[in-house]
Amino acid sequence: MQKYGLTAAQAAEARKKYGGNALSAPPRATFWDKLWENFRDPMIKILLLALLVNAAFAYLGHGDWLETAGIFMAIILATFVSTWSEYSNENAFQKLQEEAARIRCRVWRDGEPREIAIDDLVAGDAVILQAGDKVPVDGVLLEGSLKLDQAALNGESEEAAKSVAPQGFVWEAGGTDFLDEHRLYRGSVVVEGTGVMQAVKVGDASVYGQLTRELQDDERDSPLKLKLKGLARQISKFGYAGGVLIAVAVMLHKMLLAGGFAAYTANMTQVAGDLLQAVILGIIIIVMAVPEGLPLMIAIVSSLNMRKMLNDNVLVRKLVGIETAGSLNLLFTDKTGTITKGKLEVVRFLTGDMQEYVGFGELPEKIKELTYQQVVLNTSAAVTAGSIVGGNMTEAALNKYLADYRMERTPERIRFVPFNSASKYSWAQVKGSGGSYCLVKGAPEKLLLRTAYYWAQDGSRQPFTAAMQQRLEKRMLELAGQAIRMLALCTYEGTPEDDAPQEGLTLVGVVAIRDDVRPEAAEAIAAVQAAGVQVVMITGDRKETAVAIAKDAGLLRRPEEIVWSSAELAALSDEEVKLLLPRLRVVARALPMDKSRLVRLSQELNLVVGMTGDGVNDSPALKKADVGFAMGSGTEVAKEAGDIVILDDNFLSIKKAILYGRTIYNSICKFIVFQLTINLSAVAISFIAPFIGIDKPLTITQILWINLVMDTLAALAFGGEPALAEYLQERPKRRSAPLVSRAMFASIAMGGAYMTLVAIAFFKSAWVDHLFRDAADHIYTYTGFFCAYIFMAVANGFNVRTKDLQLLKNLELNKGFLQVMALIVAIQVLLTYVGGSILRTAPLNAQEWLAVIFCGVSIIAVDLLRKLLAKRNAE
């Protein structure tokens, strides 16, 4: 019976008395808070001020109450829609963050090791810790020894050593002391050792909980968002200049109609009214030119794609990660569980005298007993009858290999030193009936050099000769060529002082473990390589095993491609590595510093670098990389360092992350083209109109409706664009490349110019005017233009959503696009019947609708011509 921990009943009682380990959620803004915040936007304030002035003039008899009401309704509608989109997307993101926070901990309950959710821990629980774990509560160490990284709490980079608390240790004495050698605090990370701690302070009572309540998140903009803000600033300047010029142009037009400055200023009341209308129009143009829909678009497209990615086992922790994934040039990836299945299986057992066994039950009795001890004592895992809690996949495979075998009396473990990537072995000192001895488990190339004996079939220790070692190494080389990895098991008759002995080991045997390549991994790697991403496998396996797996996975195909061992990499200078890096495909027997060095050198070459990892030793490289992919089965510190968590540890999911990253980038680019085309044409039309004798080609309320179409509804339409396999055929975007490419600029310029020319034709062409019924105020022509303008914007949406000449290509994958565009058209038709003087519309007859539809869809022909010319020039 385990001497630590609680029973289920004791845990329930502790929960009632002290509460659980869940942290209080930070206060969140309600829908009404966000709505009020949107009304405090500087642009909305300006519009509201203009609305009040316009209402005052209407009250004095110099304005239009219906137009005033239209402005009010348009502002309210735009603000409500924007607020609702922001609120709903924040809720979606919050759910994803809650999913990311579901950490499992290992505790002793009812005398058995169990995994429970971190929130279910209670005061008094005995928590099992090992390297890579994040300490989940404040408490004291009961067993073992640890080294912790407490930088998240006290900013100190030096590791803190922790030892077992003495009997009668009082937590409250001395208050909070991070340097106390017995206290462990939530949020620190175990970097070395194993142990058991007792929970003392849980949830908000912990120091971490107190800090969480006091700290406020400072969200930093991602690189893409910064680029978008830069683009927005440039467009805003264009809008401000356009707004001022349009206001001036309106006043000059009024003056010319009145017969000159003197005649015009004779009626100052009229001048004041005209000036108000000109200022309001200028403000509306500024609002229209400012792309406030871009942040909304990012929120929508990110939320939609993040939810899709979660269904594909990709959890995005940081938005910067997914957008950067689409621009990767180089990806360093783990092997086990990522390229391979991660389901290790023992397939052979080799003894020192070259006997080979398949099943554990076939082993001689002495070797069987020592192998059992290696599995249950020389391990970081907690092993119980029929189960294993903690540990890695290798330890799980060894435990499975034991099947139902159990020793009657298992020796007592006195000391344990976990495996680390530098020494490449773990060892345990144990005490049995015959005295004290050591169990050593690790890489054969490290341990066989220290081996002097082997355990024979009759249980005796025999000399392990050089000839026997050569035969064994030859056989291991053959197995390595079949993508099989080896693990040596040794013993030492005695008690070492500090480390495992450098000589005199006795070989128990070599375990041959196989981890087959995932069937889908080779296909995924080929797709990622076709996307212009160089893939390099970094593994702790020996070189021969790594090469065999790399060939099976399709990483090694050409003679000029390079495979390095850690030693070979260390022998090269930085400049030599940079020169050969484009040909690198595999790094075997890799050390943590190898990963960090490769990331650093790649970034010095101005490459966008990705790194996968699962262990605490992978964290520096994950943090340093442009995007870190943490494995879902990995340590909490690795997940904390990563930007994206691959929940199923599958390389196919990394391919999907790259695809979704490119999908987000392409969706935003489509939206920008759609939005800027309307921006350009609306500002150009409003600026040119007064100089060619057109009075209000678009009214204020019409412009506000267009602004709603351009921002919120279009963001919804383009936010659902599908992840297309063709995006993986594109080359990665250069880090310094502008957001608006030449092709995008050509589409914006041609579309904007054509929409402006159509506007001029509507108001100045007698032929177009004759297509509509005569009226004193040309209401049918004005209505026709308003509808044609919206229809052109909708038709242009089909143009920009695909680079292909087939406008309906993949449209069935984004049914929301059709629904939003159909909604815009339906509302536009309805407005012609109910808009009246508010929107300056009147019902059109069948002939007039045909003319409107023809003008609307004609922009498709114009853009198809542009695409044909661009395609011909590309050829």
Image: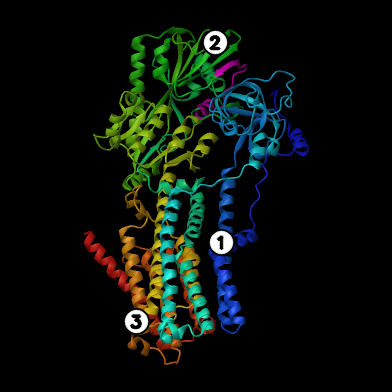
Within 10 Å of disc 3 (Cα), the crowding (few <14, some 14-19, many 20+) is: some
Q: Quadrant of residue 783?
A: bottom left
Looking at the picture, tell me which residue is in the foreground, 188 or 720. 188
Question: Could you tell me which quadrant the N terminus lies in?
Answer: top right
The segment highlighted magenta reads 395-416
Using the image, determine if residue 769 lies above or below residue 49. below
Q: What distance separates the C-alpha of mark 2 from that of mark 3? A: 97 Å
* For discs 1 and 2, the disc positioned in front in the rendered view: 1
Question: Which residue bears the numbered disc 3?
Answer: 761
Q: Residue shown at 49%/58% (left/top)?
A: 295
Number of marks: 3
Residue 438 part of the magenta-drawn span? no
**Contact flag, marks 1 and 2 (Cβ < 8 Å):** no
Image disc number at residue 437: 2
Question: Which residue bears the numbered disc 1?
Answer: 41
Which structural element holds mark 3? helix
Using the image, determine if residue 421 lies above or below residue 752. above
Q: Residue shown at 65%/47% (left/top)?
A: 26
The location of residue 22, given as percent across then percent down, is 67, 41
* For discs 1 and 3, the disc positioned in front in the rendered view: 1
